[in-house]
Structure formats: structure tokens, C-alpha cells
Image (cartoon, helix red, strand yellow):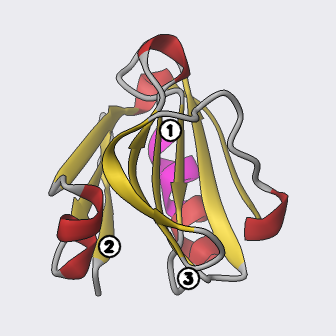
Amino acid sequence: MPIEVISEPRRIVIELSGMAVIGAMRRRVEIPTDRITSVSVRPRKEVKWGKAWLRVPGTHIPGVIRYGSYGVGAGREFWATMREPDVVVIEAGGGPYCRIVLGLPDPHGVAGAITAAMR
């Protein structure tokens, strides 16, 4: 699996492997659980870019793949998606990313595990 999400009591670790590392130009993202404000599963087509227009670094092929960091400063986002119908959206504050969007085989299970780790 190119994306693995590890839920720990104090942090969430997102590990990328294979082609995901090449697309995102990053192997790992960590988020302290106390900075996560919400976790949801939403249809990928409903999740908009927000203000994150600048890809630094990353890969984007419209409608196919979006991997990497987008935007700068407080509006920075991390995306790791490929044509999945539903994605996990993690909203965070005070960290390197304000939003993380992940395409996973079991988005509801991962969202539940992250929510449990936040408690």
C-alpha cells in the first residue's frame, strides 16, 4: 500500500512508499493529535483546493493524481490522492499543514482510528 496511516496517542504518522514518495517528493508527514481540529470522509470531487495553488513540491495531473505540498505559510496543504471516490480530510491548526487530504482503501476506518487517537 503506498500510503499507511499510523495512529498514536500523541501523533498521526503518514508514511508514503513506492510511487507515492516520488509523486509527493516526501516520505513521511507527522501531525500532533492536539493540533487536529477535525477529521472527515468526503467525496473527493467535493474537496476543493482552497488557497493552496502553489505546488511546492508535488505532482498534479488533473482528475488523476494529486500528491505533495501545496501553498505556503498558514494555508499549506498536503494531498495524496489518486481517483479514489472518497478521501480522508484532516483539518489542523498551528502545524506545517492546515489540511491533509488522503486517498485510502478504507477511508472510514482510518478516519475512525484518527478520531480515537485524538481522545
**Residue 65's disc number:** none
Is label 3 or label 2 in front?
Answer: 2
* For residue 66, above or below residue 75: below
Q: Secondary structure at mark 3?
A: loop
| Dot 2 or dot 1, earlier in sequence | 2
Quadrant in which the N terminus is drawn: bottom left
The vertical placement of 55 against 115, above or below, is above
Mark 2 and 1 residues: CB-CB less than 8 Å, in contact? no
Name the residue beneath numbered marker 3. 106
SS at mark 1 in the image: helix
Q: Residue at 17% x, 74% y: name it.
A: 17
- Residue 46 in which image quadrant: bottom right
> Which residue type does callout 1 highlight?
Met
Residue at 47% x, 22% y is 35
Left or right: 78 as drawn, with respect to 84: left
Q: Residue at the location (28% across, 58% down)?
A: 24
Q: Which residues lie in the magenta part?
A: 113-119
Along the polypeptide, which appears first: circle 3 or circle 1?
3
Q: Is residue 83 above or below residue 39?
A: below
* Mark positioned earlier in the residue sequence (3 or 2): 2
Residue 41: quarter of image:
bottom right
Mark 2 — residue?
3
Report the side of 25 relative to 62 (left or right): left
In the picture of the structure, the residue carrying the numbered disc 1 is: 118
Q: Is 24 above or below relative to 82?
A: above
